[in-house]
Image (cartoon, rainbow, N blue to C red):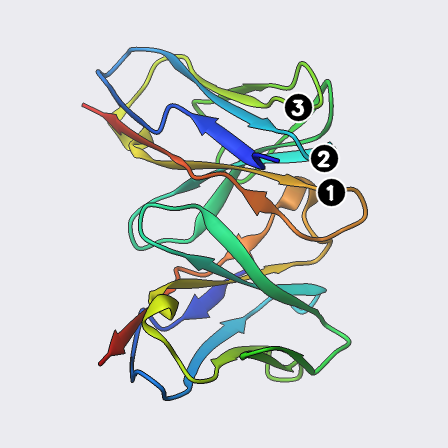
Amino acid sequence: NAGVTQTPKFQVLKTGQSMTLQCAQDMNHNSMYWYRQDPGMGLRLIYYSASEGTTDKGEVPNGYNVSRLNKREFSLRLESAAPSQTSVYFCASEPEGKNEQFFGPGTRLTVL
Amino acid sequence: GEDVEQSLFLSVREGDSSVINCTYTDSSSTYLYWYKQEPGAGLQLLTYIFSNMDMKQDQRLTVLLNKKDKHLSLRIADTQTGDSAIYFCAESASGGGADGLTFGKGTHLIIQP
C-alpha cells in the first residue's frame, strides 16, 4: 500500500493563477480531509469529505474548492491563488469507525 | 472556539525522558492525539487516548490525561536522536468528521548528545 499520496510536492504560482492539488489513498477509506499548515501553527481544516460525492467546509474554506469524484481521490482547487494561500497542504484519510487520520507527505505551495 | 496549547520547544539529552505537555479548552473533547512530524514529512499518528482513560502506554510512549485540568502529556522514555521532530497535540469531540481535528502549534523536540 502506498497510503496517502499527494502531487505535486512543490509548486510556485503567481497571484491569480489556478491549480489543483491532487490526493489519493489506496486504503479504501471513506473519509478524507484537506488541511493547511502555516509556520508556527497547527493544521487547520479546509474541507472534509465523508464519502464519494459529499463535501463539507472546514475552518478555513474561503478561496478553495474540492472535488471527491470517487472513493480514492480528493482534490483541492485554488481558482485564483493569493499570497495568503502560501502554505503546506496536507491531505488525510480515515477508516470507517476508527478515529485515526493518516496523512500524506504534503504539498508545499508558494504564491508570489 | 476550541484551543490547544503547547510549548514551542523542548530540549533533552539523549537517553533521558522527554515530557511534552498540552492543554486544551474544549470540555467535549473525546479523543486526544499525539502526532509526530519529521522535517519535510507528513504527520504520523503516534497514539491517541479516549477521554475516559487516564493513561495509555505503548512501548517507549506513555500518555497521561488529566481531564479535570484538561491537560495531556506525552512521555518518551530513553529519548533517541530519531525522536527529534515536531510533536503535535490534537483533540476532537467526534474523532474527526466535518470538525476535523484541532491541533496545537507543535513542540519542537531537540535532542542533545
Is label 3 in a helix, a strand or a loop?
loop
Residue topped by disc 1: A95
The answer to whether marks 1 and 2 mark residues whose Cβ atoms lie closer than 8 Å is yes
Quarter where residue A78 is shown = top left
Quarter where residue A29 is shown = top right
The answer to whether marks 3 and 1 mark residues whose Cβ atoms lie closer than 8 Å is no
Q: CA distance from mark 3 to mark 2?
A: 8 Å
Q: Residues within 10 Å of mark 1 (few under 14, many from 20)?
A: some
Q: Residues within 10 Å of mark 3 (few under 14, many from 20)?
A: many
- Vertical position of residue B85 compared to residue B23: above or below: above
Q: Residue furthest left?
A: A112
Say whether residue B108 is visible.
Answer: no
Q: Which label is found at residue A72?
A: 3
Quadrant in which the C terminus of chain A appears: top left
Which chain's residue wears label 2? A
Residue topped by disc 2: A29
Q: Residue furthest front?
A: A1
